[in-house]
Amino acid sequence: MSRSEFAEFLIARRAQLQPEDVGLPAGRRRRTPGLRREEVAALAGVSADYLARLEQGRDTNPSTAVLAALADALRLNEIEKHHFGKLALGMEQKANCPSAGQAREQVSPTMQAVIDALHPTPAFILGRWLNLLTGNPAWRDFAEPLGMFDEESHGNFATFVFAHPTAKKTILNWDAAADMAASALRAAVTRFPDDPSVQNYITALSRYPEFERRWREHRLTDFRTVVLKIQHPVRGEVEVEIETLDPAADQTVMVWLVDRRQARQPGLRLVNE
């Protein structure tokens, strides 16, 4: 998975660049979108043959200097550079770092006690693939009217965002939520490339064009600092500021704290620990 992810990322990012983005003349209309392989190779100072080997997965050990040059040639931002580096590191260390295997979805009594103790502050636990594993009563009170526990959501935050019929009306800045969910899943795939459940899950989500496009383009955003505006059926318009700590384990505790800066409407601050 790491090898194909790295190669697919190179190809996807090359396809999204236009000649004018990198200071090249537009020229005639191109048969395929994006820059030619030769153009990216020249910008990065590598041979086209070497770039072809990387894109085809035939070379899996690019140097740090080559990675930096390719990142600059592809005009990657800091978030994309970080992801790019993790993909390359995954190729290099895959043989020496055994996979964590299938996700651990059972919540321990200690973790359950932690979120119960936070009541009446809404708190819940997400699994590796954004499954909603458990939550305290305050979380259920907030999330249930949104439809997160409806059949269409399948108990999963990403499925709620892309599949639930009211998600786009409920989340006023829905694109931000969609980018957040897709980016979180992309980060999980990079971290846990050999989880046997991942491919079926991504295939199921790819039935939805908005997800498929983001996944195909390797769309990435800083999902740790997203602000969501939610039209809550009971509470009215609520602003949710999201901040996340990078979790090292399969499960993430999420706590929604009242944002005291909002005087007119209650806001919520989302923190991962």
Image: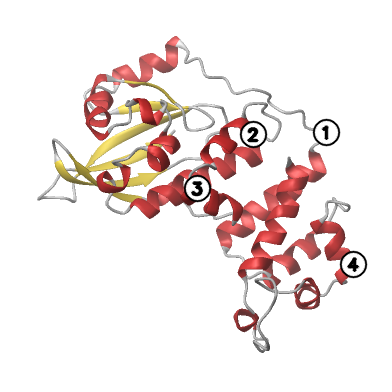
Residue identified by numbered label 1 = 96
Q: What's under tag 4, amino acid-wise?
A: Asp
Residue in the picture at 54% in, 30% down: 128
Q: Position of residue 233 (x, y in %)?
A: 16, 37
Q: Earlier in the sequence, mark 4 or mark 3?
A: 4
**SS class, disc 4:** helix
Is residue 172 toward the left or the right of residue 225 in the image?
left
Q: Position of residue 129 (x, y in %)?
A: 53, 32
Residue identified by numbered label 3 = 211
Q: Earlier in the sequence, mark 1 or mark 4?
A: 4
Q: Residues within 10 Å of mark 4 (few under 14, many from 20)?
A: few
**SS class, disc 2:** helix
Q: Are marks 2 and 1 in contact (CB under 8 Å)?
A: no
Q: Position of residue 211 (x, y in %)?
A: 50, 47
Is residue 16 toward the left or the right of residue 174 in the image?
right
For the C terminus, the quadrant is top left
